[in-house]
Image (cartoon, helix red, strand yellow):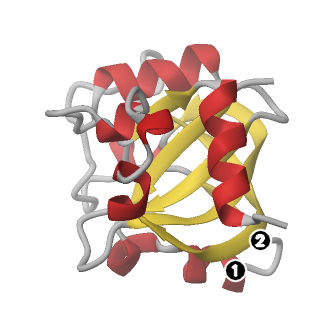
């Protein structure tokens, strides 16, 4: 099993939206960065866990935990001319963009970015690296365990 951090803007699709889905499951669509796409397409497996991270908002941070429940498949928004994620170069025969399906494991109290930065044990966490803009990043098992302790110290 691998661990991940998946960013989403809460005003576009936040943990609250996922919690309201009847199956608590959603496709992680709209990723338009090749490295993040490759993580989903090539490295994510069913059963992997991820932190659901709220970004581009007044208080960014980890808002919950999700599990990958379906391996990568073509992101339908790339073919939709009305979508802001449409890609003219993508075809059904040669899709360029992929998504995985994730299911809500649990919502957590928000663990703010500032709190993550306050712990030297997390200094190498990708989300904390200068210039990191990826919407999906791997999380080392030691970092995962440390953050889990922060989320539930009991």
Residue drawn 45% across and 31% down? 137
Q: Position of residue 22 (x, y in %)?
A: 80, 81
Query: Closer to the camera, 97 or 116?
Result: 116
Residue 24 is marked as: 2
- 56 w.r.t. 48: above or below: below
Residue drawn 45% across and 72% down? 13
Residue drawn 66% across and 38% down? 144
- 26 w.r.t. 107: above or below: above
Name the residue carrying label 1: 19
| Callout 1 secondary element | helix
Asked if residue 138 lies left or right of residue 146, the reply is: left
Residue 91 in view, yes or no: no
Q: In which quarter of the image is the C terminus?
A: bottom right
Residue 85 in view, yes or no: yes
For the residue carrying disc 2, how many other residues have a C-alpha within 10 Å: few (<14), some (14-19), or many (20+)? some
| Callout 2 secondary element | loop
Asked if residue 20 lies left or right of residue 126, the reply is: right
**Cβ–Cβ below 8 Å for labels 2 and 1?**
yes
Q: Where is residue 110 in the image (x, y as percent from the top left)?
A: 52, 75
Q: Toward which corner of the image does residue 95 lie, by quadrant?
A: top left
């Amino acid at each position: 099993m691998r661990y991940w951090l998946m960013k989403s803007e809460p005003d576009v699709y936040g943990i609250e939206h996922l919690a309201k889905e009847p199956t608590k499951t959603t496709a992680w669509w709209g990723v338009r960065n090749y490295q993040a796409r490759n993580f989903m397409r090539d490295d994510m497996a069913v059963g992997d866990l991820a932190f659901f991270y709220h970004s581009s908002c007044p208080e960014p941070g980890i808002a919950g935990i999700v599990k990958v429940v379906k391996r990568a498949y073509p992101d339908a928004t790339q073919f939709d001319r009305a979508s802001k994620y449409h890609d003219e170069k993508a075809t059904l025969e040669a899709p360029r963009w992929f998504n995985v399906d994730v299911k809500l494991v649990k919502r957590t109290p928000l663990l703010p970015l500032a709190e993550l930065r306050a712990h030297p044990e997390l200094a190498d966490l990708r989300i904390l690296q200068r210039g990191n803009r990826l919407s999906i990043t791997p999380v080392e098992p030691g970092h995962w365990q440390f953050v889990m302790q922060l989320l539930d110290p009991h």
